[in-house]
Amino acid sequence: MNCNVLIVDDSPILRTAIKKVVRLAGVPEDRIHEAGNGKEALEILETVWVDLVLLDLNMPVMNGEEFLVELRKREDLADVAVVIVSTESNKGRLERLKALGVRSSLHKPFEPEDLCRLIGEITGVTQ
């Protein structure tokens, strides 16, 4: 099964590392998209359908929480699966995000196997 994944993180190094794991999870390179902040991610979503967003929270321009609020306002994107991949540990903030429909969260630094497992569970893509 093919799916499109959007990685949203302000660190190019972390985007590259996450992209490698996404490829290992079975997602083809041409189906992986990247954005450096929430605003860029929304612009990408204007032209590309994604099945899964891997979202950092602490970014400039538009942070992950602001992005998620905007994403859920759009009827055509309201059901897109979102997984938080962040250093965020504020339980109140994470609960607010779960209320906005976040499927899961993964704390940085993470084990590649854990991200692979989450991608497989959510998208049905297997290695």
Image (spheres, rainbow, N blue to C red):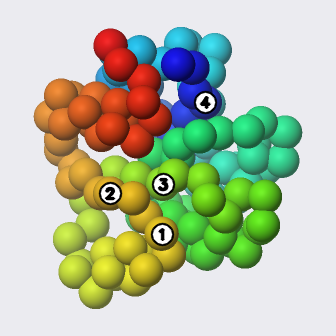
Other-residue count near label 4 (Cα within 10 Å), few / some / many at <14 / 14–19 / ≥20 = some
Q: Which of marks 2 and 3 precedes in the sequence?
A: 3
Q: Are marks 3 and 1 in contact (CB under 8 Å)?
A: yes
Looking at the rendering, in which quadrant would you find the C terminus?
A: top left
Alpha carbon of mark 3 to alpha carbon of mark 1: how far? 8 Å
Q: Which residue is mark 3?
A: 82
Q: For residue 11, what is the image quadrant?
A: top left
Q: Residue at 18% of width from left, 28% of height from top?
A: 113
Kindly identify which numbered label has been placed on residue 101.
1
- The location of residue 38, given as percent across then percent down, is 62, 58
Q: Residue at 72% of width from left, 74% of height from top?
A: 73
Residue 99 to residue 63: above or below: below
Q: Tell me if residue 96 can be seen.
A: yes
Q: Which of marks 1 and 3 precedes in the sequence?
A: 3
Q: Are marks 4 and 2 in contact (CB under 8 Å)?
A: no
Q: Secondary structure at mark 2?
A: strand
Q: Which residue is mark 4?
A: 4
Amino acid on which the number 1 mark rests in the picture: Gly
- The location of residue 1, given as percent across then percent down, is 53, 19
Q: Is residue 29 left or right of residue 107?
A: right
56 and 73: which one is in front? 73
Alpha carbon of mark 4 to alpha carbon of mark 2: how far? 18 Å
Amino acid on which the number 2 mark rests in the picture: Ser
